[in-house]
Amino acid sequence: MKKTLYIFMALFFALSIQSCKKDKVESEQRLLVDRDYIEVGSRADTYQLDILANAAVTVSSDKDWIKLDSTVYPKGKNKIRFSVSKNSEEERSATLLLRLNDNLSQEILILQESGKVPVFYVTPAGKGDGSSWTSATDLDQALEKATTGSTLFLAEGTYVPTRTIRNGDVNEESDKTIEIAKNVSLIGGYAANAKPGDQPNPALYKTIFQGKLSSGKSVFHTVTVTASADPENQVRLENISIKGGNATDRSAGTTIDNIKFSRGQGGGMLIGMARVLLKNVDVVDNKATADKGTAGFAAGIYAFAGAQLRLENCRINNNSNSGNNGGGLWIADGSLIAYDSQFNHNSAKGTAGGVHAYPNADITLYNCEVIGNSNTSYGAGVYLREKSKGIFVNCLLAENSSTSANGGGGLMLYDNSQADVISTTITKNAVVGPGGGVYRRSNVNNLTLINSIVSGNTQAGSSTDVDAYSDNIAVVPRIQHSVAAQAVYAADGSIVPKVSFEPASMLNPDYLPIGAENPSMSYGLSPAGLLELAKKYTPALDDSRMQQDINNNPRSSSWMGAKVK
């Protein structure tokens, strides 16, 4: 059984005290290791474990596919590092022997997964070995038998969590989850009676991961991704709907591979560490509440601890947080890149109704919608906080609302954050406080608007569509080839004299610029200029997207905003 961090630290403290008492007889020799076994992937890689001892430790392995960095470690706290060679065969095991003396030693089991990459066919009630559609297995068995790189093909139907998360409480029904602990692909949308060679049709054959249990309770997370970060592999989910989770009891959770997975973060999905691709995935109708313990964060998705998330044609919609911050998606100490996706009609009783980047998060949205989200504090649409960065290309941030006087309707920057808004429309957001379009507050927040329209938003009477708190007034935003409120900005950042933008008559109900005298259709950046702009970023922005609008229509003139037709 794994020792807790508290025991580990207590012993370390005790050993430290003992080392200072030189007039005392040295205590008996002790050895503490942070785990009894380690599961490793099939590829060649390096790993480590923490030990604590009050005497020198020798280390050896019984298998030659394990190479130790060192075989002797001094007393105190150390990290034992070792590498494993690539495994192309069946699962194999080895043992590390840690020895202080002839009477005190400890064995650590190393399990390396098979290098063979099986494919599995899955149905909700499958009883076979998963080798074919006629011998389909269930999801639990497939996830258990899969190895890095495996693909699981899922037939239509509803899949409900049945297994407790690793190291979770088996007596807590809500600790059940669909845990993805390996870098594998899950592809849904196949017919219940699928045959060899059939292709998925997700519009017709719905594959649903449902967090609402037959007992009436909801799991804390419908899906939990605990796979390790792997530069060569990733977790992939395609053609799947994820719903019914309820993130609550945020102060409790479980620790997996030294990462704390909180019960109260991510009702639909909780993603730690891993690289994850979601393609044509719906994360909808999940909750975060104060039903149990500390109120939860992020009803839809919470990705943290260096997680790298990529969305393609996804919908993070209609998730609600009735007790705290984060409605749709939250990136914490990680990154997000999203294409052609929606973050719509989510809500939070607190900050960040739609998308939250906090802290130290990097998000890039191409051709995305952030529409109709609501909250009761900062950042109804998108909220960037604490050294977070956002890039928005061909995006529509509209109809987001907040009942708070704190401000920030479409986009909010707080505490040393940065946003670059390119060919984007931010309109019809409504807040009681300042900055219905964009608002900046706390320390230095840098805003760039290029080829964009930020106009037609509703805010406090003394404010405007692009505004800043007094501590950010001196931080001048860079605005070029754009509309801010009624002002039209030229290439050099100056306001074009005697030209104004009237959102009521110059944007139609679908947010498309209209009218013969509309400056947003003539003062924008040219397609060639957009290509040059893309090259100035590191890494460069997607130049194909820069030449298109939100609906992938080509940009052929100097036209601002998300839509050109």
Image: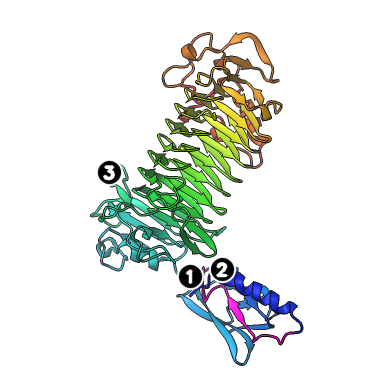
From the viewer's perspective, is the residue at label 2 or at label 3 nearer? 2
For label 2, count other residues whose C-alpha is less than 10 Å away and answer few (under 14), some (14-19) or many (20+). Answer: few
Q: Which residue is mark 1?
A: 115
Q: Is residue 29 magenta?
A: yes
Q: Amino acid at mark 3?
A: Leu
- Magenta segment range? 24-42
* Of the pair 388 and 349, the residue shown nearer to us: 349
Q: Is residue 275 magenta?
A: no
Q: Which residue is mark 3?
A: 204
* Mark sitting on residue 6: 2
Q: Could one spot residue 380 in this view of the protein?
A: yes
> How far is disc 2 from disc 3 in space, using C-alphas?
51 Å
> How far is disc 2 from disc 1 in space, using C-alphas?
36 Å
* Mark sitting on residue 31: none
Circle 3: element type: loop
For label 1, count other residues whose C-alpha is less than 10 Å away and answer few (under 14), some (14-19) or many (20+). Answer: some
Circle 1: element type: loop
